[in-house]
Image: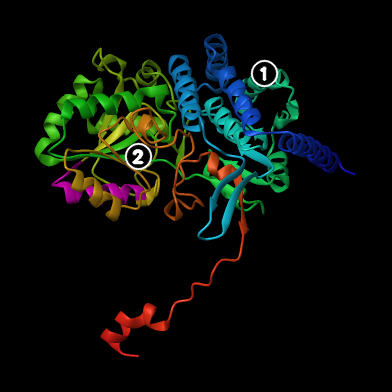
């Protein structure tokens, strides 16, 4: 056996053992479990991350290891996303008998999927796995997370705390495991093949690998949010919300605005409002400079990726000309397409801005941008005309239209909207996904129906075809 073959054998054995342990733990959890037990397990995991001192420690380690985002916003994200998820799950019946329908003779039950494989990104190495872990435990599953290479240390520390917390409940710690370091594609592929459900958040190559694993998979599409500002919008409110969203955690969120499309009548006023909110409008030469730093040889570099604004300004030489209140950069654009990198996702503290003659033109530009990248994910709209939101819902290829909100907070659910709290947004068939909603607990269960005989309800042909025959004949 060659060294490579020996390594492959050892890696596969590690995953075999990991999944086997998870399967035994899950069987014990389900056989001895109840909704009360499952809910306590969720509370234990949630408090691991939300407890202020642990949250701070974990956030600091995540930023230090990944080099992405900032500590203060990571702490807020960890807290709010977990609190919101726990709000959503409170009093939800996610296991066992849930309903009877005497008229249809049906009784419905919920059962766990089994062992979940969760592939998590370096951009959210804490909030995303905790969200997945809580959803898995709420529904009676075991879960194995596969962190990115840069997310290994935060994940390992997080799991140590989680093991301590669930052991206090008398539950097997193997309910929550992670792929041991060093992570590798081979280990991740083997995990996906052996699991009962694969959940992938992160790169599109990982999403495709999940779908190709042979295991039922839920992957989420690429973000590349476009937000439209029309002539009816409250411009100062819109600018404040866009600035908050664009700068939060240094734009690590896939739901952070990447492009704005502003209708021409209020374009100049919107530029002023954005400047007051910390946006620095660049000229063409400066925009090309930022583009050349962020993309080289057709690939995104790490120089500006999810970095503090001071580092962005220093790396681009804009520190000498930027206003003192600068929080993010605004790059005017007119071209759209694969040959123009600014059309796509940036994951940095800058966005492009486009001008459109009217609302219909703005919609066409937004569609063109997301046809290149981000189809199915979400669009933003700042307007007081609700008909325009309805128009977008039926015109654009998008699963969410976020109206008058800070996009990166709202898309994944927030305390002032009705979306489920999540860090994984399904993009439907437009984004190549199996789901079109925010990933939530309902995706982690199997539904079982008990089906009984009821009085036959068979229609006559006339009941179905009468109107058709009247119009077109038999």
Dividing the picture into quadrants, the one containing residue 66 is: top right
Q: Secondary structure at mark 2?
A: strand
Question: Percent from the top left, x then y, of residue 437?
Answer: 44, 45
- Label 2, label 1: how many angstroms apart (C-alpha)? 38 Å
Question: Percent from the top left, x then y, of residue 369?
Answer: 32, 47
Q: Residue at x 34, y 49 (%)?
A: 337
For label 2, count other residues whose C-alpha is less than 10 Å away and answer few (under 14), some (14-19) or many (20+).
many
Numbered disc total? 2
Q: Main secondary structure of the magenta part?
A: helix
Question: Percent from the top left, x then y, of residue 39?
Answer: 60, 28
Residue 225 got which mark? 2
Q: Secondary structure at mark 1?
A: helix
Is residue 396 in sight in this rendering?
Answer: yes
Dividing the picture into quadrants, the one containing residue 226 is: top left
Residue 165 got which mark? 1
The verdict on residue 365 being magenta is: yes
Q: Is residue 98 left or right of residue 344?
A: right
The front one of 237 and 278 is 237
Q: Which residues are magenta?
A: 355-370
- Classify the position of the N terminus by image quarter: top right
């Amino acid at each position: 056996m060659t060294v490579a073959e020996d390594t492959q054998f050892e890696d596969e054995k590690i995953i075999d053992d990991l999944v086997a342990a998870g399967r035994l733990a899950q069987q014990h959890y389900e056989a001895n479990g109840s909704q009360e037990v499952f809910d306590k397990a969720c509370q234990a995991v949630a408090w691991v991350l939300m407890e202020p001192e642990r949250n701070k420690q974990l956030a600091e380690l995540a930023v230090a290891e990944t080099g992405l985002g900032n500590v203060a916003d990571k702490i807020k994200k960890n807290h709010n996303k977990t609190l919101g998820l726990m709000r959503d799950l409170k009093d939800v019946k996610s296991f066992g008998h849930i309903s009877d329908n005497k008229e249809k003779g049906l009784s419905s039950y919920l059962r766990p999927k089994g062992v979940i494989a969760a592939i998590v990104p370096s951009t959210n190495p804490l909030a995303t796995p905790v969200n997945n872990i809580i959803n898995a435990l709420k529904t009676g599953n075991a879960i194995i997370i596969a962190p990115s290479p840069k997310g290994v240390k935060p994940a390992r520390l997080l799991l140590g705390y989680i093991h301590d917390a669930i052991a206090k409940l008398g539950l097997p710690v193997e309910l929550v495991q992670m792929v041991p370091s060093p992570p590798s594609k081979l280990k991740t592929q083997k995990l996906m093949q052996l699991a009962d459900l694969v959940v992938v958040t992160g790169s599109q190559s990982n999403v495709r690998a999940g779908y190709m694993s042979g295991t039922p998979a839920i992957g989420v599409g690429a973000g590349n949010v476009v937000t439209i500002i029309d002539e009816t919008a409250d411009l100062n409110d819109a600018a404040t919300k866009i600035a908050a969203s664009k700068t939060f955690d240094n734009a690590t969120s896939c739901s952070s605005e990447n492009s704005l499309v502003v209708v021409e009548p209020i374009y100049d006023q919107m530029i002023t409002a954005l400047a007051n909110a910390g946006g620095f409008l660049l000229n063409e030469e400066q925009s090309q400079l930022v583009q050349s730093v962020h993309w080289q040889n057709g690939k995104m570099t790490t120089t500006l990726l999810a970095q503090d604004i001071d580092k962005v300004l220093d790396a681009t030489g804009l520190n000498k000309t930027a206003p003192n209140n600068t929080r993010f950069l605004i790059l005017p654009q007119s071209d759209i397409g694969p040959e123009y990198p600014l059309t796509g996702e940036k994951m940095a503290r800058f966005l492009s801005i486009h001008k459109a003659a009217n609302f219909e033109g703005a919609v066409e530009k937004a569609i063109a941008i997301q046809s290149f990248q981000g189809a199915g994910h979400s669009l933003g709209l700042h307007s007081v005309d609700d008909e325009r939101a309805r128009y977008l819902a039926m015109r654009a290829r998008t699963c969410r239209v976020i109206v008058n909100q800070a996009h990166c907070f709202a898309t994944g659910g927030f305390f002032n909207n009705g979306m489920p709290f999540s860090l994984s947004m399904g993009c439907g068939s437009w984004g190549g996904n199996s789901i079109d909603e925010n990933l939530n607990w309902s995706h982690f269960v199997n539904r079982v129906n008990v089906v009984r005989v009821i009085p036959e309800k068979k229609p006559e042909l006339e009941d179905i075809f009468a109107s058709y025959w009247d119009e077109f004949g038999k």
